[in-house]
């Protein structure tokens, strides 16, 4: 799914939603009993430390429990309040609102208080809270959107549009402001103005944005432009995004408003900024904004998908699955959620559960290639190559007119075919992928490496690998290919240099470590070669590579033993001659 990408690094540095300081101990209140105050403070240490460790590991449920317990023992500790609030917010705990009132200088706390007013329908209070935020950092981007939606929620539509108008006419973040102005105009029944603003936003974004396209298609369907609405939704299939799996359901519910009221609009504003921060690798701030979005719209599928993606990137597949659980089966994006669930189940080690989910999707959406593509990938990772090829075959059959964005399908099927020892088919698929997208580094590298392994087309293979390396100079697999073809062509010193760099880039890759062993052996560095082959065996190599590594070790050790035996015999012979 595409979201705004235009937020700069410098703005990120200005955003401070929480204190980074360690918990400081305040002086005891003047009227406090010194002994009891010290006792309470000491009792806070254990849960405080446990909570901090849990927070650093991303376990905000435990962090919240422990830090709230610590705060109960030391309620006047301001820094502990900050951290307990943050953990409670990220865990979705109701105590976060109570603590927020004790933190007037914390921007996230003020936003949560504004959210509380939104959920109570107290729009005047919400507007006042949002207007009172300090005008600094990215809050300056978010603030007009929140104020405008609070004004609209309070029945002041003209004021809401007036709030956004200067930003729509500006240059920075124009797409976001125009989109939200269009939503407000649309909900207010100003069809012509909404249509104009949707087009302004579409032009300013420059690429497909799921939320915008859904809202625009809904407006088109409700205003007598059914064919245009169909084209808008159908275009999502060409993005190469997993959202394509939801296109049939989106078309069936095209007139449905994705943003139904002011509270939804506020959640949408939080999501837009969270997505931008996520793309700038400011994950903690993005997570805070997503929790604020889900605070006012708990079932919001787009926010839960992004939050789940962030958890998955942090290697927390179980938490990522839990994040998706509240999305109802009736949601238009439920097929995307199910596709993501299948991938997460596989990452969590529940491969059969993943395949069952995909089987259900394949039955529910028989025209969609995406479930078959993911099934092919899962089976390939399980070394079930023949089954993987069959799944990819179904995906290709459901892609009758492949375009540029479909190159990964043929690339991935080519890998499965190569592993299944169906090289002519694999080679054809790699070449087809390059026809669709000629300069893809992954395809150039895989085909060039495969030719190198076979000892064929070496000049063309080198050209392809070098082109891939120019595109991705810090890719360990591509650097490995450079070293491997240098070794095959007899350039041992260059091979060692390239493969040492490849191991630095990918130290846990068994294939690269094994190749470096080969280069060391060719360079006469026998002990280092033995070490690299042994290391490669310890890194869980593919089953078909294990006997190859074992054979190299066996042959090398036998050669060393024979060499030692020969040396011993020569020494004995020399000793006899001396006698």
Image: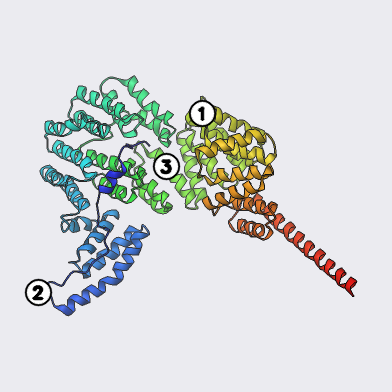
Quarter of the N terminus within the rendering? top left
Q: Residue at x 75, y 61 (%)?
A: 560
Looking at the image, residue 199 lies above or below residue 23? above
Q: Quadrant of residue 185?
A: top left
Query: Which is nearer the eye, 69 or 256?
Result: 69
Q: Dot 2: few (<14), some (14–19), or many (≥20) neighbours within 10 Å?
A: few
Of mark 3 and mark 1, the one earlier in the sequence is 3
Image quadrant assignment for residue 540: bottom right
Between 313 and 527, the residue placed more toward the observer is: 527
Residue at the spot of label 3: 338
Q: In the displayed orientation, state which residue is furthest to the bottom.
A: 35
According to the picture, the residue beneath numbered tag 1 turns out to be 399
The 10 Å Cα crowd at callout 3, few under 14, some 14 to 19, many 20 or more, is many
Say whether residue 413 is visible: no
Which label's residue is closer to the chain start, 2 or 3?
2
Question: Mark 3 and 1 residues: CB-CB less than 8 Å, in contact?
Answer: no
Q: Could you say where residue 304 lies in the image, as x and y percent from the top left?
A: 34, 45
Residue highlighted by disc 2:
31
Label 2 vs label 3, nearer the camera? 2
Residue 242 appears left or right of 503: left
């Amino acid at each position: 799914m595409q979201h705004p990408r235009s937020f700069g690094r410098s703005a990120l540095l200005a955003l401070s939603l929480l204190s980074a300081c360690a918990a400081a101990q305040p002086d005891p209140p003047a009227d406090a009993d010194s002994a009891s105050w010290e006792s309470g403070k000491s009792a806070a240490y254990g849960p405080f430390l446990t909570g901090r460790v849990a927070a650093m590991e991303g376990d905000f449920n435990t962090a919240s429990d422990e830090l709230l317990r610590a705060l109960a023992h030391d309620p006047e500790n301001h820094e502990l309040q900050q951290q307990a609030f943050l953990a409670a917010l990220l865990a979705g705990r109701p105590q976060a609102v109570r603590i927020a009132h004790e933190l007037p200088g914390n921007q996230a706390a003020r936003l949560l208080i504004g959210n509380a007013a939104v959920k109570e329908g107290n729009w005047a209070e919400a507007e006042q809270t949002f207007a009172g935020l300090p005008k600094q950092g990215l809050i300056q981007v978010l603030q007009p959107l929140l104020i405008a939606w609070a004004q609209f929620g309070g029945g002041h539509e003209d004021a809401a549009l007036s709030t956004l108008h200067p930003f729509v006419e500006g240059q920075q973040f124009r797409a976001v402001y125009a989109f939200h102005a269009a939503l407000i105009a649309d909900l207010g029944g100003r069809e012509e103005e909404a249509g104009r603003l949707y087009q302004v936003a579409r032009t300013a974004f420059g690429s497909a944005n799921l939320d915008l396209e859904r809202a625009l298609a809904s407006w088109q369907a409700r205003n007598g432009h059914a064919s245009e609405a169909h084209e808008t939704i159908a275009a999502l299939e060409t993005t190469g995004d997993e959202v394509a799996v939801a296109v049939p359901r989106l078309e069936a519910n095209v007139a449905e408003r994705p943003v139904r009221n002011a509270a939804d609009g506020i959640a949408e504003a939080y999501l837009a900024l969270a997505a931008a921060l996520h793309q700038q690798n400011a994950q903690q701030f993005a997570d805070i904004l997503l929790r604020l979005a889900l605070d006012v719209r708990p079932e919001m599928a787009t926010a839960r998908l992004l939050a789940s993606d962030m958890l998955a990137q942090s290697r927390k597949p179980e938490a990522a699955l839990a994040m998706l659980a509240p999305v109802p089966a009736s949601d238009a994006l439920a097929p995307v959620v199910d596709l993501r669930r299948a991938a997460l189940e596989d990452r969590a080690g529940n491969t059969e559960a993943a395949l069952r989910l995909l089987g259900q999707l394949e039955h529910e959406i028989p025209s969609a290639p995406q479930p078959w593509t993911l099934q092919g990938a899962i089976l390939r990772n399980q070394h079930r190559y023949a089954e993987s090829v069959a799944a990819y075959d179904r995906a290709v059959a459901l892609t009758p007119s492949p375009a540029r964005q479909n190159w990964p399908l043929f690339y991935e099927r080519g890998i499965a075919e190569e592993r299944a020892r169906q090289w002519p088919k694999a080679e054809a698929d790699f070449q087809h992928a390059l026809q669709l997208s000629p300069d893809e580094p992954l395809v150039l590298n895989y085909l060039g490496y495969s030719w190198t392994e076979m000892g064929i087309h070496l000049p063309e293979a080198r050209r392809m690998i070098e082109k891939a390396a120019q595109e991705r100079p810090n890719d360990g697999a591509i650097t490995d290919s450079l070293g491997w073809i240098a070794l095959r062509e007899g350039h041992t010193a260059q091979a060692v240099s390239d493969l040492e760099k490849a191991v630095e880039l990918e130290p846990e890759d068994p294939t690269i470590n094994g190749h470096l062993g080969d280069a060391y052996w060719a360079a006469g560095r026998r002990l280092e070669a033995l070490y690299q082959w042994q290391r490669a065996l310890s890194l869980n190599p593919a089953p078909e590579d294990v006997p190859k590594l074992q054979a190299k070790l066996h042959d090398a050790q036998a050669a060393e033993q024979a060499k030692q035996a020969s040396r011993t015999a020569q020494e004995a012979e020399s000793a006899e001659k001396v006698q």
